[in-house]
Image (cartoon, rainbow, N blue to C red):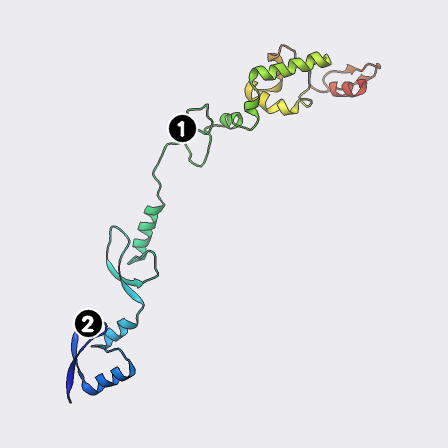
């Protein structure tokens, strides 16, 4: 049987093939291979790639659509763990007036005190402003304000002075007694259990 030289469509090597088989393949548009192994490899959608683990670099067969290619699960885990690691950078407290560094990167502030000082509205009231508001209330009403009456100042006063009563003392007044610890007399002579009750009865 007459044979001719044919180039394998996969490995590109020359091999001999019977003329009849060659003509048949040409007639039907078939690819021609030198071996069953080349025929099998040509049907595979995998291509030769290099393992993406920088320590490995082994040559493997993988699909074209794969973004990362690894030769084993061990290489995959090693490389992915390296990608997740972030460089350790010292971060400062989010409070602009604080120069401390954070111990925990999941937190924005170094302490609860810095959290309170950074609360919205705190910057609107300075120490002098709080004292001025309390003194003005006393001049307008003839008495010291209760914490409930100036509730919007409660948090700023607590953060700056430590408590509402300390803010009242800083304004030059003696804080109100604890509710129900002292009886008060309304303008009509009615005995009240608290200062708040006296205010209501007197209006």
Q: Residue furthest right?
A: 188
Residue 184 position within the rendered picture, expressed as x and y whole percent measured from the top left: 77, 15
| Secondary structure at numbered mark 1 | loop
Q: Is residue 17 visible?
A: yes
Specify the farthest residue to the top: 172
Q: Nearer the viewer, residue 132 or 182?
A: 132
Vertical arrangement, residue 19 with respect to residue 105, above or below:
below
Against 119, is 52 above or below? below
Residue 169 spot, x, y in % from top left: 61, 12
Residue 101 image label: 1
| Tag 2–tag 1 contact (CB < 8 Å) | no
Q: Is residue 66 above or below residue 2?
A: above
Q: Which residue position holds label 2?
A: 12
Question: Which mark is in front, 2 or 1?
Answer: 2
| Identity of the residue drawn at 59% across and 12% down | 170
Q: Is residue 17 left or right of residue 196?
A: left
Q: Where's residue 6, x and y in %?
A: 18, 78
Question: Is 146 in front, or is 21?
Answer: 21
Quadrant containing the N terminus is: bottom left
Q: Quadrant of the C terminus?
A: top right
Q: Is residue 66 left or right of residue 179?
A: left
Crowding at mark 1 (Cα within 10 Å: few <14, some 14-19, many 20+): some
The picture quadrant where one finds residue 191 is: top right
Could you tell me if residue 166 is visible in this image? no
Q: Judging from the image, what secondary structure is the residue with disc 2 in?
A: loop
Q: Name the residue located 18 percent from the left edge and 85 percent from the top edge.
A: 18
């Amino acid at each position: 049987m007459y044979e001719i030289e044919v180039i394998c469509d996969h490995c590109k090597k020359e091999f001999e093939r019977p003329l009849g088989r060659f003509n048949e393949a040409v007639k039907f548009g078939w690819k021609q291979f030198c071996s069953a192994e080349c025929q099998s490899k040509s049907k595979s959608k995998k291509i030769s790639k290099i393992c993406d683990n920088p320590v490995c670099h082994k040559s493997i067969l993988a699909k074209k659509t794969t973004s990362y290619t690894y030769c084993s699960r061990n290489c995959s885990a090693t490389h992915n763990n390296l990608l997740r690691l972030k460089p350790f950078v010292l971060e400062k407290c989010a409070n602009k007036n604080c120069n401390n560094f954070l111990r925990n990167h999941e937190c924005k502030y170094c302490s609860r005190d810095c959290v309170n000082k950074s609360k919205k509205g705190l910057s609107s009231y300075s120490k002098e402003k709080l004292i001025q508001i309390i003194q003005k209330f006393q001049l307008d009403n003839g008495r010291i304000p209760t914490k409930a009456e100036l509730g919007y100042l409660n948090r700023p006063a607590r953060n700056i002075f430590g408590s509402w009563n300390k803010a009242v003392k800083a304004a030059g007044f003696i804080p109100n007694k604890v509710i129900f610890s002292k009886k008060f007399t309304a303008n009509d002579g009615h005995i009240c259990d608290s200062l708040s009750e006296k205010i209501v009865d007197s209006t």
